Image: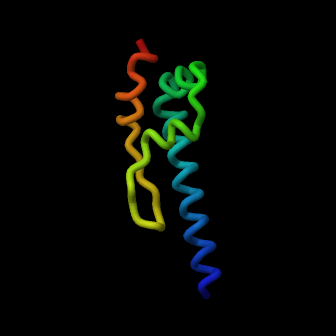
Amino acid sequence: EEVVEDFYDIRSLEIDFLNFYCNLKRRNKKLYLALKKNGITDKQMYDECFISSDDKHINYDINKLVKKYENILK
């Protein structure tokens, strides 16, 4: 039973990461492409957006990313 719970926790985190990158690429395509062009990795993008949460989900704030790299978009 514990193994099954761990699997679902890991799968939940994978889905959260996937949602983060899909949302960033789809809804903020201009920002994403500008950051990639300037050598910012996906991991760096995520690290800038990360908000502490419980162990079963991740939270992120894309606005933090926009504020940090707003000069790239100009």
Is residue 25 rendered to the left or right of residue 52?
right
Q: How is the image coloured?
A: rainbow
Residue 67 position, x and y percent, is 35, 28
> Which residue is pictured at 58% across the width and 72% down the height?
8
Number of numbered tags placed on the structure image: 0
Quadrant for the C terminus, please: top left
Q: Residue furthest bottom?
A: 1
Q: Residue at x 41, y 53 (%)?
A: 59
Q: Quadrant of the N terminus?
A: bottom right
Q: Is residue 15 above or below residue 66?
A: below
Q: Splitting the image into 4 quarters, where does residue 53 fall?
A: bottom left
Instruction: List x then y, in percent, for residue 6.
Output: 59, 75
What is the x, y in percent for residue 20?
50, 45
Task: Quadrant for residue 39, please give it.
Answer: top right
Q: Residue at x 56, y 23 (%)?
A: 33
Tell me what residue is drawn at x 42 percent, y 24 percent. 69
Query: Residue 7, position in %: x, y?
Result: 63, 73
3 shown above or below 24: below
Position above or below: 58 against 63: below
